[in-house]
């Protein structure tokens, strides 16, 4: 099946730092989605990308749909404590409703 | 969590019992998806349903698992004769339509523990 490589696996940062994470795929996707999941909760949609090259912002979050359609990145600027959690990328290929999820990036903020 | 309602949130079953997980999609959504998440892993697709139809069940185990989305009422994911390996979080998601331009919203999950 399709594989999504998400990196880094974990990040330890100080409050106020910027964060960057990315996903790469072995195949082309039509849609890229970024979710955040807190312990014991479901994934919450952060940003949806539908067009190659698209750059979309949601507050302090910015995500881009790679021009090759095989990658996407998420940036978080000026991190705050509530940014702690696990971030997942998810991709959906053409003509297929199945989302393939990355393995997640666990973000921890060091006091 | 965007209006997708799942219950129960937590379910404990003994090996060999049946587990039934329910999902009510967001209002107006007619497409439902079930995903499974093992600890420390991402979500894995199980099944995609529309009202009264299974569209794609390629992620469902061949035995013991079944899903339905009746004309009236919630979608049900049923696991018969549960085993320890079925312990996981099961997430339901819904979308307005089935084409790739529609966003998928997730519920808060049902955590199944098999003892």
Image: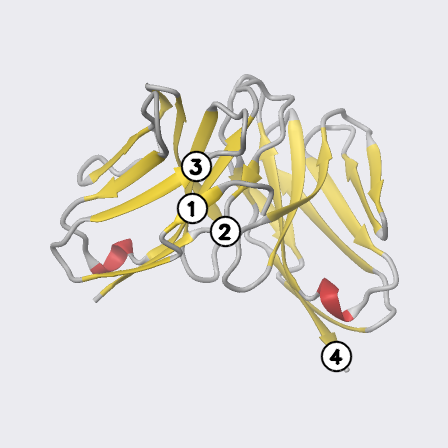
Vertical placement of A61 versus A15: above or below? Answer: above
The label nearer to you, 4 versus 2, is 2
Q: CA distance from mark 4 to mark 3?
A: 39 Å
Residue B77 on image: x %, y %: 30, 39
Q: Mark 3 falls on what kind of element?
A: strand
Q: Which mark is residue B24?
A: 3
> Taking A88 as reference, is B28 above or below it?
above
Reading the image, the residue beneath label 2 is: B108
Q: CA distance from mark 4 to mark 1?
A: 34 Å
Q: Nearer the viewer, mark 4 or mark 3?
A: 3
Q: Chain of mark 2?
A: B
Classify mark 2: helix, strand or loop.
loop
Q: Earlier in the sequence, mark 2 or mark 3?
A: 3
What residue do we see at 16% from left, 62% from top? B14
Chain letter of mark 3 equals B
Residue at screen point 34% across, 24% down: B72
Residue under pointer 1: B6
> Which chain is mark 1 on?
B
Same-chain status of marks 4 and 3: no
Confirm or deny contact between disc 3 and disc 1 (CB under 8 A): yes
Looking at the image, is A21 positioned above or below residue B22? Answer: below
Residue A3 is tagged as: none
- Callouts 3 and 1 on one subunit: yes
**Left or right of residue A75: residue B39:** left
């Amino acid at each position: 099946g399709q594989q999504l490589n998400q990196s880094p696996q974990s990040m330890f940062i100080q409050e106020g730092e910027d964060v960057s994470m990315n996903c790469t795929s072995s195949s082309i996707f039509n849609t890229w989605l970024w979710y955040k999941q807190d312990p014991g909760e479901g994934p919450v949609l952060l940003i949806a990308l539908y067009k190659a090259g698209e750059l979309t912002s949601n507050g302090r979050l910015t995500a881009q749909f790679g021009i090759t359609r095989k990658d996407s990145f998420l940036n978080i600027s000026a991190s705050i404590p509530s940014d702690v959690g696990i971030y997942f990328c998810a991709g959906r290929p053409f003509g297929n409703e199945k989302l393939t999820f990355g393995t997640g990036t666990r973000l921890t903020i060091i006091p | 969590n965007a209006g997708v309602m799942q219950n129960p949130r937590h379910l404990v079953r003994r090996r060999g019992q049946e587990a039934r997980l329910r999902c009510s999609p967001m209002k107006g959504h007619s497409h439902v998806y079930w995903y499974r998440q093992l600890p420390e892993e991402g979500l894995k697709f199980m099944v995609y349903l529309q009202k009264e139809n299974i569209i794609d069940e390629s992620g469902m185990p061949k035995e013991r698992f079944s899903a339905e989305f009746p004309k009236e009422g919630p979608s049900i994911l049923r696991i018969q004769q549960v085993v320890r390996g079925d312990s996981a979080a099961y997430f339901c998601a819904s979308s307005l339509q089935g084409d790739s331009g529609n966003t998928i919203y997730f519920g808060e999950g049902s955590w199944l523990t098999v003892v």
